[in-house]
Image (spheres, rainbow, N blue to C red):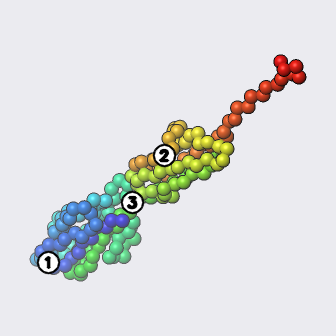
Amino acid sequence: NGSVVADFFKKQESYTLKKPCLEPISIDITSSNNLVTITALECENGVIRGDIGTFIKGKGVLRLEAKPDEGYYFSSWSGADFAEQNVTLDTAEAENSYTLSAVFEKYSYKITVTTLGKGYVEKSADYVDYGGSVTLTAIPDYGYFFDRWRYQYELRHENPLTISNIQGDVTEEAWFLPNQVKVALIIQSPDGN
């Protein structure tokens, strides 16, 4: 869960962008002489794009868009009652002060496993975030053995199986086959031949 936070329209010289990203970045918003200036808004898991530059208070609108990085989606704005990903702000509100935050969430994908034959599968997770991994362990019932996995039309025999860099729902199938017992039937005649 990541968010980009900036204080808009306060009469100060600079603003610091606060967010749970690896490296801090800053945004400069100045409001003086009836002008509003906005520069660079971005975060590791998304960016806020829009009208960047200097605007006259009350003489137009500012358009902002929350653009998520790959593997993320725009979840919401916090600090304001905006429902849409694209926001329009009236420059007349430049004297008001509020905090606007774009929240980006990682996609999460479902891990589904079916079995063929008698056995079951233990999963390290039922849902995995974008780019994550899951480990599947096939456990055969008595009298059966694990034969193979069928994953996206590919057959694999390793057990446990680790699937990495997940970028969509995963549907895996574990195949269990019955143990085969060889029976030799020896028939002897009563005379020993």
Q: Position of residue 98 (x, y in %)?
A: 26, 79
User: Is disc 1 in contact with disc 3, using a CB cutoff of under 8 Å?
Assistant: no
Q: Quadrant of the C terminus?
A: top right
Whichever of callouts 3 and 2 sits on the residue coming sooner in the sequence is 3
Name the residue tied to disc 3: 106
Q: Is residue 61 visible?
A: no
Q: Secondary structure at mark 2?
A: strand
Name which residue type carries label 3.
Lys
Q: Is residue 178 left or right of residue 138?
A: right
Look at the numbered disc 1 and give the secondary structure of its residue: loop
The one nearer the camera, 146 or 73, is: 146
> Which residue is label 2 attached to?
161
Q: Residue at x 51, y 50 (%)?
A: 136
Q: What distance separates the C-alpha of mark 1 from that of mark 3?
A: 34 Å
Q: Which residue was labeled with disc 1?
A: 12
Side (left or right) of 109 relative to 66: right
Residue 64, horizontal then vertical, whole percent: 29, 65
Q: Secondary structure at mark 3?
A: strand
* Circle nearer the viewer, 2 or 1: 2
When the figure is inspected, residue 89 is found, relative to residue 110, above or below; the finding is: below
